[in-house]
Amino acid sequence: MSISLFPTHSPLSVPTKVVIIDDHAAIIGMMTQVVESLPNFKVVGSALDAGSAVALCRNQPVDVIILDLVLPGVSGLALLNDLIVIRPQARVLIFTGNLNPSAMRGALTAGVLGVVEKMATLDIFRAALQSVAIGQTYYGPLAGQLIKGLVSRNPEEKTGITELTKREKTVLCYVAQGMSSKEIAGKLGVSVHTVINHRSNLMKKTGLRRVAQLSLFAAQSGLIGEVAAQH
């Protein structure tokens, strides 16, 4: 099963601008058709290699970057870090046929919101794209298995969860959904300032900064089901 942390798709009022980076033109063509079959999604450019990808993202505003990890002459993760610097607000969906534990960890560390293997169904790809577009995380079946493997091999990554208060655990799960401080405040009936304080404490206690990292931490620690059962 794929892992999607509370994927509730809301309508997008303006077209989501998508860039596709893959070293196969045929795959880019197929993906373009799939992306543009969704309401309010528009492919604004594509690239077959790292150099073209960097130039494209420098010159073209983009909301979502779909990135393959296998590109000629460069590591996809290295390119990912460059693209994050160029377009820090862009959300990234990894769509690759070369997924392994090292790549999975690198993607999560970089703050990637979605990871889907190319053997996954088109329905999974569509769901991942829609989730990432609205700031939510989505991991395909193989990605989910790799995350479980990373957790089982690294139980020390669970440390710190006992230091969180009940309210901080709840806020953590809402952050993992991609919710803003204002949205969380409305959900909990508290002030935005209070939520900001909780988020600050979360970062201090876990040492994590990016939403994807916090999402993984919440999933690893078993908080997703725990909080969902309470609300």
Image (cartoon, rainbow, N blue to C red):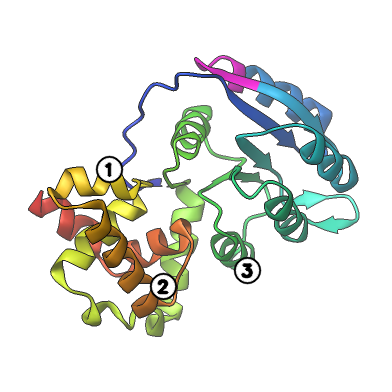
The amino acid type, in three-letter code, at marker 2 is: Val
Which label's residue is closer to the chain start, 2 or 1? 2
The answer to if 222 sits in the magenta stretch is no
Q: Which mark is residue 211?
A: none
* Percent of width and height locating residue 58: 80, 41
* SS for callout 2: helix
Where is residue 26, by image quadrant? top right
- How far is the residue under mark 2 from the one under mark 1? 30 Å
**Structural crowding at the residue carrying mark 2, measured as other residues with C-alpha within 10 Å and reported as few (<14), some (14–19) or many (≥20):** some
Q: Which mark is residue 183?
A: 1
Residue found 77% across the figure and 39% down from its top: 57
Residue found 91% across the figure and 55% down from its top: 73
Q: How many marks?
A: 3
- How far is the residue under mark 3 from the one under mark 1? 34 Å
The amino acid type, in three-letter code, at marker 3 is: Ser
The amino acid type, in three-letter code, at marker 1 is: Glu
Nearer to us in this view, 184 or 163: 184
Q: Which residue is mark 2?
A: 151
Left or right of 47 in this view: 176: left
Nearer to us in this view, 100 or 169: 169
Q: Is residue 7 placed above or below 207 in the rendered structure?
A: above
Q: Is residue 5 placed above or below 161 in the rendered structure?
A: above
Image depth: mark 3 or mark 1 in front: 1
Q: Which residues are magenta?
A: 35-42
Q: Is residue 62 placed above or below 182 in the rendered structure?
A: above
Image depth: mark 2 or mark 1 in front: 1
Q: Which residue is mark 3?
A: 102
* Percent of width and height locating residue 218: 32, 63
